[in-house]
Image: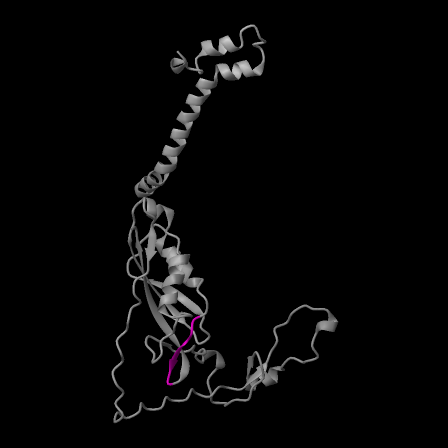
Amino acid sequence: MAAKLNIFESKWVNMVFEGRNQEYGAFVLRKKSSEYTIKGIVLAIVFFTLSIAAPVIVNIIKANLPKEKVVVVDDITKLEEPPPIDKNEPPPPPTEPPPPLKSTVKFTPPEIKPDEEVPDEPPPTQEDLKVVDAGTKTEEGDPNGVDPSLSEEEVGPEILTFAEQMPEFPGGEEAMREYLGKNINYPPLARESGIEGKVILTFVVGTDGKITQIEQLGKKLGWGCDEEAARVVKSMPGWKPGKQNGKEVTVKYTLPISFRLN
């Protein structure tokens, strides 16, 4: 009889607490002990199963997520080496010097100012203007020369398309690819519409390493890709300027950037 006795049966609990205060907490705990035990076992099995299955579930979710859209920077265009210099070729003829300029006398246009701000400098007389022309400053020149206003404006530095030492991004080409990859943001409209393509930019690297005159070659890609490529190139740090015959020169540089959805 003792071997068949189950102490978890409710009748056993009723027998023990017969004639006693069943409002006491021990009676309630004993009464529901089997229920609590079963719930504990079920919860333990559930938590154990989740802990084992969690890594598998995470891997499945990651596999089903859309892949990130990235920007790929093409290899930088390599220009061919220039032809060798023929030492026997005669040098080009010297350029003709500009024609001499006429003499000018400084003439300040009239302007209303307080007396204390008026410079003590008499204006040119009519007799002076019969001999020389009015100008922004007084200069001696050739009476038979040309008017300074007709002379050519000052010509800026020559822009080369190739130099012995081309301009270089700080750290080299690999550093430039890394910079573009980190700073270019794929335009949302282009990403959502599946737009891919190439943007080819040209820009000028001055002798001070600054980037100017950013232009685009060929057909525009659109959807904000062209503007984004130009924005990042404009924000680049100063470059190492190009050199020709050991001297720093201004060089035009070409950079293709591809927008691809991986």
In the image, residue 73 above or below residue 37: below
In the image, residue 48 above or below residue 238: above
- Who's the residue at 38% across and 67% down the image? 203
Q: List x then y, in percent, for residue 179.
A: 40, 62
Locate residue 169 relative to residue 106 in the image: left or right: left
- Who's the residue at 36% across and 79% down the image? 165
Q: List x then y, in percent, for residue 195.
A: 29, 49
Image quadrant in which the N terminus is located: top left
* Numbered circles on residues, count: 0
In the image, residue 13 above or below residue 226: above
Kindly indicate the quadrant of the structure image that contains residue 167: bottom left
Q: How is the image coloured?
A: one colour
- Who's the residue at 69% across and 68% down the image? 113
Q: Residue furthest top?
A: 19
Could you say which is closer to the camera, residue 252 or residue 6? 6
- Who's the residue at 38% across and 65% down the image? 176
Could you say which is closer to the camera, residue 222 or residue 50? 50
Could you say which is closer to the camera, residue 146 or residue 230? 230
Q: List x then y, in percent, for residue 21.
A: 59, 9
Q: List x then y, in percent, for residue 175.
A: 39, 66
Q: Which residues are magenta?
A: 239-245
In the image, residue 142 above or below residue 122: below
Could you say which is closer to the camera, residue 11 or residue 53? 11
Locate residue 166 relative to residue 12 in the image: left or right: left
Kindly indicate the quadrant of the structure image that contains residue 75: bottom left
Locate residue 126 relative to residue 152 in the image: left or right: right
Kindly indicate the quadrant of the structure image that contains residue 139: bottom right
Determine if the magenta segment contains residue 81: no
